[in-house]
Structures are given as structure tokens and as C-alpha cells.
Image (tube, rainbow, N blue to C red):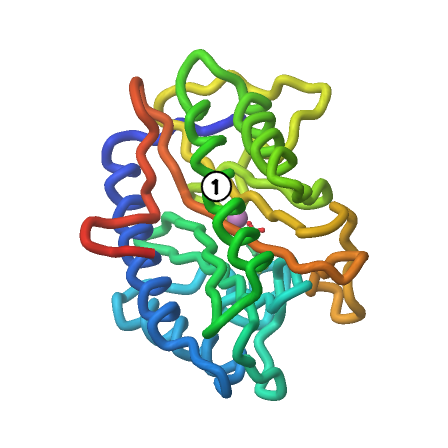
Amino acid sequence: MPITRKSQSEIELMQEAGRILAITHQELAKAIKPGMTTKEIDRLGETVIRDYGCVPSFLNYCGYPASICVSVNDEVVHGIPSDKRIIQEGDIVSLDAGVIYKGYHSDAARTIAVGNISAEAEKLIAVTKQSFFEGLKYAKPGYHIVDIGRAIQSYVEANGFSVVRDLVGHGVGKKLHEKPNVPNFAGKQKGAKLKPGMTLAIEPMVNAGEYDVVWLEDDWTVVTYDGSLSAHYENTILITENEPRILSRAEGIEV
Ligand code: MF3
Ligand code: CO
């Protein structure tokens, strides 16, 4: 499959998938409290998604057993919700979710501070979020995929953190993962030229320490190799003739 460019009617469906995903993230951010299990977060997320008549993109995707990826502290991504994992004051919790609305996916992640967190953790969350917006400046016709990753990497490294290499962003639409890959770093390849109608999930994963990651025995949970904290921030975006449009945010929703 080549890189798809979405029609106006497809974009409207993706915007609705994104709006419902933004609502889901807002509800999760409001609910998350010390003492809650990661399984409870998953159940709440799935309930919100289904209440809006949508289907969670991640449930059973390649055998993933839940609707929300919940990754705590040194967990980078794809943490599996568990009724044994209890959220603690001071944790940072990355929530990654996807929504299918009328056959179209949206994909977004947020990292939430639980109560008082360390100054380093605060900075990590803020730098990870801002790195997405640095990359977004290049999500326009005339640039290539690599320009997005280069901007993300430069900003993250200028702030003393590192960008994960083993996982990347991606095209999104009728499938959760479409072409092209969207790395958060500058490799040797320029990647595709950006064109209006392309829809991408840009998702920096940023470690406070080194960029190396390892997979746990469950074959899903990715953790930092050095045990340092990690944060994740992701939106589904649309390339337009002018400024990119963030599809997984909505009017009046803060997250
Ligand atoms: N946002 C994640 C990604 O793009 C999706 C999680 S994979 C799943 O890789 F299996 F959990 F769905
Ligand atoms: Co994604």
C-alpha cells in the first residue's frame, strides 16, 4: 500500500474519531488517582470509548489484551493494564489509546503526573510534549518525514534527554498503522515528501537517561534499559496546504 491521502469525508470521520479520543484522554486524566489500578484505568477508557459508539483500536491488535496502554515511570510504552499494579503518588503514567469511528482510527498518548512528582519528571513531561510541537512545525508540504524527526530530536537532546530509536510514529487511517514510518530522530533517509491529505501519528517517546529500551517477558511492555523515567506524547494529525491540523484534540478539551 502506498501512503494514502484522505478525502474530505474520510477526514471528517477521523476528526470525529479524534474528538472522542480527546474526550477519553480528558476523562482518564481527571480520574487517575493514587490507589487506582492500571486495570481500572483501562476499564474506564474502554467504557468511554464504547459509550460514544466507538471501538478501542488496540483491543486484540496483534493480540494486545486491553484497550489502553498504561506505562508507568520507566515503562516507555505498551504497558499491559493489571489489577495488581497500583498507581502511586509521584508516578508518571503514560496513557496511549486509539479509537475506531466508522472504520477510521485515531491514536493519541498523554503522560500524566500523579500528585507531586520530581522536578526532573515535570521537565520530562513538558519537554516530551513540546518536542511534538517542534516536530509539528515541519508537518507541512515542502518538508519530508525526516524534518519532523530532526526537530523532535534536536529539541529533546538540547534539553538533556534522549529519544527512543526502536519505536516510531506512523501513518494512520483505515488501519492503526499505515505507511510511512515517522521516526522521532533524523536517520539517513529523508522519507516521503509531505502532501495534503496525509494523516500521521507523531509520537515522541523520550527517556530521561539513555535511549536504549528493552522488552519485558510479556513481549509487550517496553522499559528503559537504564531504569530512567520515560514519557510519551502523541497526536493524530492531518497535513494540509497550510498549517497541520491536530485531529486528536478538540475545542474545549484541555489535554
Ligand atoms: N500507539 C501505539 C502505537 O502506535 C499503539 C499501541 S500497539 C497496541 O504503536 F498493540 F497496543 F495496540
Ligand atoms: Co501510535
Quadrant where the C terminus lies? bottom left
> Badge 1: few (under 14), some or many (20 or more) residues near its Cα, within 10 Å?
many
Quadrant where the N terminus lies? top right
- Asked whether, in this view, residue 106 is left or right of residue 87, the answer is left
> In x, y percent, where is residue 246?
33, 39
In the displayed orientation, state which residue is furthest to the top: 142
Task: Write the residue at 43% across / 31% down.
Answer: 136
> In x, y percent, where is residue 2?
53, 26
Looking at the image, which is closer to me, 123 or 59?
Answer: 123
User: Is the CB of mark 1 within 8 Å of ligand 2?
Assistant: yes
- Asked whether, in this view, residue 73 is left or right of residue 130, the answer is right
Task: Write the residue at 80% across / 70% down.
Answer: 217
Task: Write the residue at 62% across / 87% down.
Answer: 84
Is residue 63 among what the camera can see?
A: yes
In the displayed orientation, state which residue is furthest to the left: 252
Find disc 1 in the rendering and name its residue. 201
Task: Write the residue at 42% across / 45% down.
Answer: 235
Choose top left, top right, bottom left or bottom right for residue 15: top left
Q: In the image, what residue type sits under mark 1?
A: Ala
As displayed, is residue 11 above or below residue 83? above
> In x, y percent, where is residue 97?
46, 60
As displayed, is residue 15 above or below residue 80? above
In the displayed orientation, state which residue is furthest to the front: 119
Is residue 1 among what the camera can see?
A: no
> In x, y percent, where is residue 202?
50, 39
Choose top left, top right, bottom left or bottom right for residue 7: top left
